Amino acid sequence: MTLKCISLNVRGINKAIKRRKLFRYLHNNKFDVVYLQETYCSKGLEDVWRNEWGGKGLYAHGSNHSRGVMILFNPNVDVEFQKTIVD
């Protein structure tokens, strides 16, 4: 099985227009697994971003000195999480 992956430093995607453009780009290019750094995500935004993405994801929100990462999975990729550990 071959997976198409990408890793990006997004420098914050709290603005809806930037996030939607990013998600559209990722879907159009059919990436299976997406690694995003410096997302500036918070626990309260997880559900909103998950709905906008349309697939499964893992989130680590970070702190004031570490602004969060996300791993997103294309909705067409069948993934099941057995165990997750977030630091």
Image (tube, grey):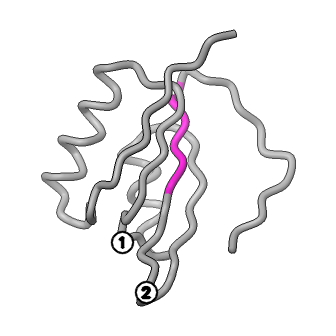
Give coordinates of residue 36: x percent, y percent.
Answer: 42, 51
State which tag comes first along the sequence, 2 or 1: 1
Residue 1 sits above or below residue 61 on the image: above
Q: Secondary structure at mark 1?
A: loop
Dividing the picture into quarters, in which one does residue 78 lie?
Answer: top right
Q: Quadrant of the N terminus?
A: top right
Q: Amino acid at mark 2?
A: His
Q: Main secondary structure of the magenta part?
A: strand
Disc 2 and disc 1: Cα gap in Å? Answer: 11 Å
Please name the residue shown 62% across and 12% down the image: 2
Residue 21 sits above or below residue 85 on the image: above
Circle count: 2
Q: Are marks 2 and 1 in contact (CB under 8 Å)?
A: no
Q: Residue furthest top?
A: 1
Q: Residues within 10 Å of mark 1 (few under 14, many from 20)?
A: many
Q: Mark 2 or 1, which is nearer the eye?
A: 2
Dividing the picture into quarters, in which one does residue 85 lie?
Answer: bottom right
Please name the residue shown 54% across and 48% down the image: 71
Q: Is residue 71 magenta?
A: yes
**First to last magenta residue range:** 70-75
Give coordinates of residue 81: x percent, y percent.
Answer: 78, 45
Q: Is residue 84 magenta?
A: no
Give coordinates of residue 32: x percent, y percent.
Answer: 52, 25
Give coordinates of residue 41: x percent, y percent.
Answer: 40, 70
**Residue on which disc 2 sits:** 65
Q: Quadrant of the C terminus?
A: bottom right
**Residue on which disc 1 sits:** 40
